[in-house]
Amino acid sequence: MPNLVQPIEPPPAAGAGGRIRAVLAGNPNSGKTTLFNALTGARQHVGNYAGVTVEKITGVCRLGQTVFDLVDLPGAYSLTAYSAEERVARDVLIRDRPDVVIAVVDASNLERNLYLAVQILEMGSPLVLALNMADLAAARGISFDLELLRKLLGVRIVPTVGHKGTGMSDLLAAAAETARSERRPAPLRIAYGAEIEGEIGILERRLAALPQAPAGIPARWLAVKLLEGDADVGERLADPGLQAAAAEAAHRLESALGDTPEALIADRRYGFISGTCHEALRAAAESRLSASDRIDAIATHRVAGLPIFLGLMYGVFQLTFTLGAPPMEWLDAAFNALADAVGGLWPPGAASPLRSLLVDGVIRGVGGVLVFLPNILLLFLAIAALEDSGYMARAAFLMDRLMHKMGLHGKSFVPMLIGFGCSVPAILATRTLESRRDRLTTMLVVPLMSCGARLPIYALLIPAFFAERWHGPMLWLIYLIGIALAVLCARILKRTLLRGETPPFVMELPPYRLPTFRSVGIHMWNRGGAYLRKAGTVILGISILLWAMQQWPGPPAAEAQALEARRAAVERLPEGDGARAEQLAALDAAEAGAALRASLMGRIGRGLEPALRPCGFDWKLSTAMIGAFAAKEVFVSQMGIIYALGEGQNEESAPLRERLRADYTPLVGFCVMLFCLISAPCMATSAVTRRESGSWRWALFQLGGLTALAWVVTAAVYQIGRLLA
Amino acid sequence: MIETLIVIGMVLLAAGGAGFALYRGATGKSRCGGCSGCGDGPCDEGKPFTWRL
């Protein structure tokens, strides 16, 4: 918020140069962001408001020759200064003085949503009301007298349906008209009653007497804010006499009316809104129980809710495997063909380092990761559909109850759900938690929610070790173990290191909507793009490095000489001898194995092996675990490279899954998944934990704690499994 | 000989690239791998969350 006593420069003429500066304001869940996306499409930029961690999303759209510079204000319920979002919204309206404010309201929930719009009108900002989700309101039997509503509020009103893009041109036309209007509208005056009005009048006069009266901000609005006890406005007006007068006025009102001015003013505003809605809104009796309410009666049922959530998750994972299998096999075949084609550029049996790098390092390494693209796309398609339908908010609501029982903040589950995608934004999402202890607790356990980068590991190992009918259930089990461990660890942290009270929290349930192909498609496209980008950059680079680390420095001279001597002996056998080819192939494999064991990676793996042996891991798996710290998918590429190199010059390579199945038991396969799920988060997650917690200590605690937990759980499962087997 | 030089060049390039990417990731300056966010710049600029709960 600017210093209010500083004169504010007059804004440029609205629409000068054909550009209009517009902001979108609205409650969370009013569909504001959907509407913003519908208006701007992909032409968006994301930044931060100065000094705060509130996102500033800007975009550009056009109507005919008119260009709109749009700012999507953070979702807010009012213009008080209680939260960073509300303060930012208020600051933008005061400081930037946009040409027009587009107030987005949920038409199916008009009464509550109008509170913010009315406050903006009280500031005298030019405003257009987007009556969003108009279809939903109509479906609920709610109808509006738009002309009357327009007269009552004194603004242009446009019904819109953000997710279908309905009403966008009309909205922009109304915004342009409002912005180009010759004079700024008079601030909305709500009658606050004789007592309050009397005190407002006194404060207004004092404000007018200030040597530098704030320009462009109605004195009445400032007086109301001072009466509400808005410390931010009081401080910035920087007049101790005025603040004292406001405090006295508030005291007088409280004595006379028996409540705080803030509550009294809010009551009057709601009274104004209620009256407006009563006049201009007609709701059919049947709308009392909407379709959303009827679905919620089942979806958020105390008993049935959780099994429904688990069942839906099960369905999602089953879908990921069953529909993902055919395209995955096509991609696998394509990469094998590519490997054969590239390998075929060299004479058969030629020991070429470039050939090995391209075939074993790049194609087996990066290709091994890329074949799981269909699974990734399907998982995120399903999750996006659930999220867009409004169901994910119900999942959070269900877990909210459970989390509260565990002494945790219900809001904590929202970042955890985001963690299914990626831990990094999930940790950033903990910013929504007010309590630092809750925030730290959530941040520390978020990596236990299985992120998208781990999916390729499961997609490789589950079909390798388990029968087809178990594919979906195994993936489901892994995700459930992650959730259960996250909740358990959070509870332990809250009862030990991060003990503290959990503030109450009300979770909003937006109405159910049919997801649109466009919205779900964009989500899937973004996810697929990020996966491809990562495979083509970080994974490619690491794969080449891993390949190099598995090539050099080569076997010790004595071993190399012994193998050389054996080869010379075998090559002396007659050409047509069947044993000769067989022995040469065995020798190739022995040479490759010796080179691998003696390589840098082999030495690291063998050094680690004793520590990971209780979990059932040999040196090959141990090396893959190290690579996974850089990026989880590297586990898959490392296994691809290690098996490609380990088989030497063998042209007929079996699929990686078959080779894994031959080397390890299903118990080891399960333990690998468990270890990857729980152990050290990736490097980016550790970095963001450090940044958001403000200390390396928490990041190291997370890293060490999760790795130790992974070791204990995996070793316990492996050892018990072995006893039972 | 040329092949060996090409391989060494590629490995050095990969080491530099991966090292740079990991350094950027570790200092929070890179795009977050696997992030389902906006795909529009580093997280410390405040990415929007694709999940809009």
Image (tube, helix red, strand yellow):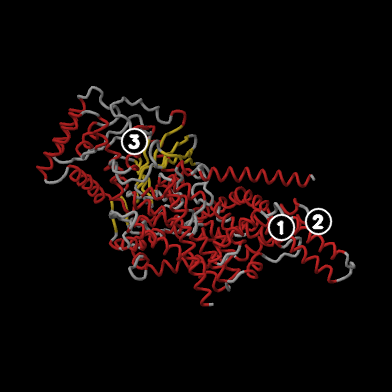
Identify the residue at the far front of this view.
Answer: A558
Disc 1 residue type (three-letter): Ala
Quarter holding the N terminus of chain B?
A: top right
Task: Give the labeled residue for mark 3.
Answer: A91
Residue A350 is tagged as 2
Local SS, label 2: loop
Q: Which residue is rendered at x = 30% and y = 33% of the image? A: A185
Answer with mark 3 or mark 2, whichever residue precedes in sequence: 3
Is A604 rendered above or below residue A95? below
Residue A595 is tagged as 1
Q: CA distance from mark 3 to mark 2?
A: 70 Å
Q: Do circles 3 and 1 both sit on a common chain?
A: yes
How far across and how far down the image is residue A330, in percent? Answer: 66, 62
Answer with mark 1 or mark 2, whichever residue precedes in sequence: 2
Decide if residue B10 is on the left or right side of residue A618: right
Q: Is residue A148 visible?
A: no
Q: CA distance from mark 3 to mark 1?
A: 65 Å
How far across and how far down the image is residue B5, in percent? Answer: 75, 44
Q: CA distance from mark 1 to mark 2?
A: 17 Å
- Name the front one of labels 3 and 2: 2
Mark 3 — on which chain does it sit? A
The answer to which of A663 and A612 lies nearer the viewer is A612
How far across and how far down the image is residue A319, in percent? Answer: 53, 66
Mark 3: give few (<14), some (14-19) or many (20+) Cα within 10 Å: some
Quarter holding the C terminus of chain B?
A: bottom left
Q: Which residue is rendered at x = 67% and y = 53% of the image? A: A547
Answer with mark 3 or mark 1, whichever residue precedes in sequence: 3
Disc 3 residue type (three-letter): Asp
Is A251 rendered above or below residue A434? above
CB under 8 Å between callouts 3 and 1? no
The answer to which of A6 and A569 lies nearer the viewer is A569
